[in-house]
Amino acid sequence: MKLLTKDTDYAVRLIVYLTAHPAEFVSIRKVSIEERIPYYFLRRISKQLIERQMLKSKEGVRGGVKLVKAPSEIALLDMIKIFQGDLMLSECMFRKKICHNRPKCVLRKEILRIEQVVETEFKQLTIQTLIDKLSK
């Protein structure tokens, strides 16, 4: 089980990088090199963030991407949902079928409770929070 995928990690790193350059459009290639993120991953990730109106893009020599939303308005949970879907610690699947024991499973009830706690924590953790912790 992975709590955060590479896509989510790369997206967070891209947004944190862009907060350091708020007034300018930044080349995806430049971010790719400086953050050591594969260029094609970063292009795909930036397109998804543009579609979600977190970034805007500009073509041309001085083009690139720019952060539109304030870092304090972007929760880590938002990033997880964009790149991973809903937070699930267990799918309760067996051989690609829903487990027959699911309705009365004690473990499932505890996992759902834990998922709620984790989701609440990720909702409170914003990009700004990460940046603030980075500068300490």
Image (cartoon, rainbow, N blue to C red):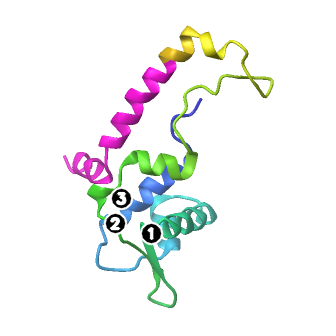
* Horizontal side of residue 117 vs 57, given as left or right: left
Residue located farthest toward the left when viewing the structure as drawn: 136
**Label 2: which residue?**
69
Q: Are marks 1 and 2 in contact (CB under 8 Å)?
A: yes
Which amino acid does the dot numbered 3 rest on? Val
Dominant SS of magenta comes to helix
* Horizontal side of residue 8 vs 92, given as left or right: left
Q: Which residues are magenta?
A: 111-136
Helix, strand or loop status at disc 1: loop
Which amino acid does the dot numbered 2 rest on? Lys
Helix, strand or loop status at disc 3: helix
**Dot 1 crowding, Cα within 10 Å, few <14, some 14–19, many 20+:** few
Q: CA distance from mark 1 to mark 2?
A: 8 Å
User: Residue 121, relative to residue 51: is it above or below?
Assistant: above
Q: CA distance from mark 2 to mark 3?
A: 12 Å
Q: Residue at x 60, y 11 (%)?
A: 105
* Residue 53 circle label: 1
User: Residue 26, relative to residue 16: is it above or below?
Assistant: below
Residue 113 inside the magenta-drawn segment = yes
**Label 3: which residue?**
16
| First of labels 2, 3 by sequence position | 3
